[in-house]
Amino acid sequence: MDSSAFNGTEATNTENHDSEIKHICVVGAGPVGLGAVKIVKDAPEFKEGKWTVTAFEARDNLGGIWYPAPADADPPLTALYDSLTTNTPHPLMSYTSYPCAPETPLYPPASTVLAYLHDYAKTFDLLPHICFNTGVASMHWDSSTQKWDITVTGGETHQFDLVLIANGHYRVPRIPATKGLDAWRAQGKVTHSAWYRRPEGYTGKIIVIGGGYSGMDVASETRPFAKEVIHSITGAPHEDEDGGKFKRRGRVAEYLDASEGKVVFEDGTTESGIDNVILATGYQFNFPFLSEPEVVPSLPAQVPPIPPTLHNTTYHIFPLAKHLFPLTTSYPPSSLAFLGLPLRVAPLPLAEIQTQAALKVFTDPSTLDVEKEAQALRARYESFRSVKGDNEVAIADAWFRFGFKEQFDYRDELYEFVGTEYRIPKWERELFEQKDLLREKCRELERRGEAEAWLRGVGSGTDPVQEWADFMWKVLQGTDHTKS
């Protein structure tokens, strides 16, 4: 649905409100937002005409980060680079309700993921509920109506009973505060991986900062084209490869003279003659449509106590019960949910169960035990504080960085909360822990030209979930299932 087609039938405007119907807003039509719309549509209340759902998407089509765009905006509309593939095998990252097609490569390219999202939207008839070219400009709680006033980029304001925020968190780059970096930026020698698209333009001596998936990909891709690549990773050993054309170093302690291209690392060693710096240093949590008094852009005071207002530190959003619901006093926690904030997780299945949890609390706010959730937040804070000390930024930075076990425990807790018997199977937990090794095994099959033969027919049987699980184990073990 284009913005011009939005006539308010999906939501109430500020002058016309039907108290019998509850209106739900989803901010964003990326992977998480699509999952949210689908889950709302599955609800009995929606099918009975008691709920409506409207998603506002600022771009002209769905897909979020998987929808390509040139790197000509500041920041770019997406951080998607040309060679990007998933870093998680699709049987572990796809929507629980919608597996990928048979024979899909385990780590599909972005174009395959985007096609999958379009198929998902078409299969579950989500497009009529999405307003494209319509971003959310602002949202404020109206205490007199007990609703959210949502103003969109066209200037119209509509009221919603529940808002599900799914605008993603890979848009606004995080630039480290390393000494001397600003001078390098002033000379045009620094870019962030958000602007990276392809390696051919990097022919000089470059340094890639960051050891995440983007940093690893950029460092690897630029090696054939650059005169020299230095990959700076916190805690990395001092290593040289390819006759010194590729170097692995620890964290940069300071950027020295930009004209000399000189940096010093934490171990005291230096490098000179660097032409370009590519920062693969992550992204900020950014919600430009939220402002005070609903959200305060600052670090909260040290816990305890739990602050009565919601804070966006750009590293985390705090305090959120179940990583979803604001524990605030100025508006009901049941009226707002932040979807997809945890990092290093499988976001699509998480979006589905998080939305189910949000709808449960929206339907019956008493199901959210506020005091119990506050205790859980205090306990989590103290666990981080025991490691990070009084460094509030470090605590905030660690807040949503889930470990392998934690993400699955969290999802299972949500399954229990909504009252379903489903629990994540053991094989899924075990395979997720080996996903990086599995990725290398798949790349080896591609190098040998065997990947297509191995994939033939996988997922086309009566139990595709189990087929994919068996296939992933066989790839890890190097057992050619085509000969069994």
Image: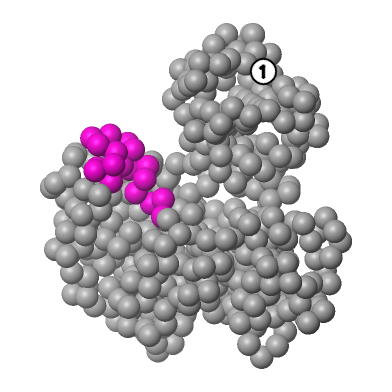
Is residue 178 or residue 404 the one in the foreground?
A: 404
Classify residue 161 as left or right of residue 266: left
Magenta highlight range: 384-402
Percent coordinates x, y for residue 454 in the rendering: 79, 72
Q: Quadrant of residue 93?
A: bottom right
What's the magenta bit mostly, secondary-structure-wise?
A: helix
Percent coordinates x, y for residue 424 in the rendering: 45, 75
Q: Which residue is mark 1?
A: 274
Is residue 443 or residue 86 the one in the foreground?
A: 443
Residue at 74%, 40% (x, y): give it.
221
Tell me, what colour scheme is on the image?
one colour
Is residue 349 or residue 238 the one in the foreground?
A: 238
Q: Is residue 390 magenta?
A: yes
Q: Quadrant of residue 434?
A: bottom right
Residue 265 lies, with reference to residue 73, above or below; the image says above
Name the quarter where the C terminus is drawn: bottom right
Residue count near mark 1 (Cα–Cα under 10 Å), binned few <14, some 14–19, many ≥20: many
Q: Amino acid at mark 1?
A: Ile
Residue 431 lies, with reference to residue 278, above or below; the image says below
Name the quarter where the N terminus is drawn: bottom right
